[in-house]
Image (cartoon, rainbow, N blue to C red):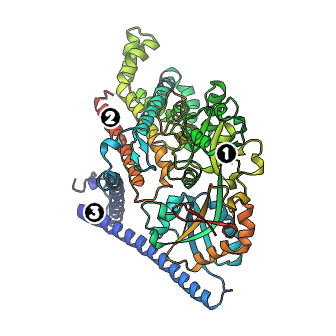
Amino acid sequence: MNEKYVDIPASVRLKGKKKTKARWAETVAVIWIRFAAFLMILAAVAITLFLVVKGMQAFVKDGVPITEFFSKNWAPTIAPPTFGTLIFIFGSFSVTFLAALIAAPIGIGSALFMTEISKKYGRKILQPVLEILVGIPSVVYGFIGLVVLVPFFRIHLHVPTGFGLLPAAIVVAVMILPTVTSISADALQAVPESMRDAAAALGATRWQTIWRVIIPAALPSLLTAIIFGMARAFGEALAIQMVVGNSAHFPKNLLDPTGTLTTQITLSMGETPSGSVFNHVLWSMGLVLLVMSYIFIILIRVLSARRKY
Amino acid sequence: MKRSGILLVFALVFVLSAACGSSSNGSKSNTSSSNDSTSSSDSSSTSSQVSGKIEVGGSTALQPLAAAAVDGFTQANPKATVDVQGGGSGTGLTQVASGAFDIGMSDKFAEAQDGIDASQLVDHKVAVVGMAAAINPAAGITNISKQDLIKVFTGKVTNWKEVGGKDQKIVLVNRPAGSGTLATFQQFALDNQTPATSSLTTDASNDVKTDIEQNPGAIGYLALSYFTDADKGKMTALSLDGVAPTAANIETGKYPVWAYEHMYTKGEATGVAKAFIDYIDSDEVQKGLVTQQGYLPVSDMKVVRDADGNVTKK
């Protein structure tokens, strides 16, 4: 730890004036880097502490029972109000899992195409396409969902509105597709060439190699890719809000409107004065989102510990 | 080495935070001093211009009017800057109470909002806005009784033919809990009944409009300022118990669904904030912009309503 960064061979060490100048520059750089790292940690700790304190207010200060918070009775404005958020927790999870269900096969398929089937076209065409998809703001995805998907479902499937879980999941699936694809591609690339050679030497076809060797070898990393995508989907608000319908009830089917934690927070935050119970409950819902992202991160750490390559 | 590095980091953080703190303090004291000076000059000669910058924010129902009034106001007072933003009535009340906004816009009485200390806020009613149930013409009705309207919004009927319309499924378009428009509509059109939870919920009036115009059989509620000539044939404002939501019916209290648009200040308004509210209260704006934008001048109202919703003749 002790000044390791100046531990370079005597032959290349700088002498005299030059040496002090270079060392000074190095000191500044190291301080800056440490400061950056420190700031990062500080931000993460501060956000967590802040959300925990804010999110606990509803339970500690206002006495909202935890059992009520996880119940399905959402009636924040009638007297006496009840703040059951189960509908939104269910909504968040359904949108996330549906989106992962759509994005995972497409994302991993595209990654296989890029790494195993056609490296040249993968790099030339798929890579830029992914970069474009990443660059599109979520409001644009939501808007396209609102003016294309929702009317499509309403007119062609003869449902009353067209808003619901399915359009939300489709919109979010497209949003997380680049994340899933690029992390999967990295995972597949990390599988050593020697394993492909060994499979070829045993007379395996390309499909057998992919199915029996490469996918099992890269599986923990592929799951990590999907969970990364799910973490993003869970926190997405704007795009979902535009197509999910935002109603506080359990959906009867995929094309029935419902709400998620994020959409409920963004919808109500501006209309509730800070300090009110309703506002505190919204912070508690934010805390649920934070806890979920911690769980996603722990899952990812566990999976990467199991990683073979 | 290591220790000095950490020390330096802390020194940096300290200097940065001190700099931020002092700069914000500086700007605050600047504005308040300029406000003080203008208010004192105001009292000496009424024709003098005010200078300084104020933040106005809150209700999205009042936002268009406030934003439109800024042009005329800054023409008369070139040294004054008025920054208008939305955020919702709750935000308007919270932020004016905490001092972040100089004027907080709200369609609810501060007294009606829990979590707000209404005693420290001063109410300026700058306009009246009527609200009406808006339906897609596919519903096939133009008038509804209050009892039927409540049945529709609470989900007791799900097809328009049950209340005299066409055979068309009802689609409810709602506003989020806490919205000023919802609060007004719920109190005066739905007799405090809560709309069914299966409804779509949209957070801005313009999106409500889009939802109603696109969905056959949709019903929602909107401030009358959102009904424009361009919406004719795509969206209808429903009469309630045979009373049309017109300015004349609202002024006399015959049509019950309306709310004051409030501009709240923390303590008595001073400086630019006072001048801006006075400008909106002036005949020029009340007879011009207010009516043009679909609001009603407060002075035209023949009835008065208090924070509890009791209506009395003026």
The residue beneath circle 3 is: B6
Q: Nearer the viewer, residue B67 or B80?
A: B67
Front one among A176 and A234: A234
**Label 3 packing within 10 angstroms: few (<14), some (14-19), many (20+):** some
| Contact? badges 2 and 3 (CB < 8 Å) | no
Q: Quadrant of residue A2?
A: bottom left
Label 3, label 1: how far apart the Cα atoms are = 63 Å
Residue lying at the far top of the rendered structure: A203
Q: Secondary structure at mark 1?
A: strand
Q: Which chain is mark 1 on? A: B
Query: Dot 2: few (<14), some (14–19), or many (≥20) neighbours within 10 Å?
Result: some
Q: Position of residue B157 (x, y in %)?
A: 58, 34
The residue under the point 52% across, 50% down is B192
Q: Position of residue A106 (x, y in %)?
A: 51, 25
- Closer to the camera in the image, B87 or B299: B299
Q: Is residue A174 above or below residue A105?
A: below
Circle 1 residue: B134
Quarter of the picture holding the C terminus of chain B? bottom right
State left or right for residue A127 relative to residue A291. Answer: right
Q: Is residue A140 visible?
A: no
> Which of the chains bears the disc numbered 3?
B
Q: Position of residue A294 (x, y in %)?
A: 33, 42
Q: Nearer the viewer, residue B25 or A129?
A: B25
Chain under numbered label 2 = A
Name which residue type carries label 2.
Answer: Leu
Q: Residue beneath label 2, please?
A: A299
Compare marks 3 and 1 and give the one earlier in the sequence. Answer: 3
SS class of the residue under badge 3?
helix
Residue extending furthest toward the bottom? B44
Depth check, mark 2 against mark 3: the one in front is 2
Q: From mark 2 to mark 3, how far is it between C-alphas?
A: 33 Å
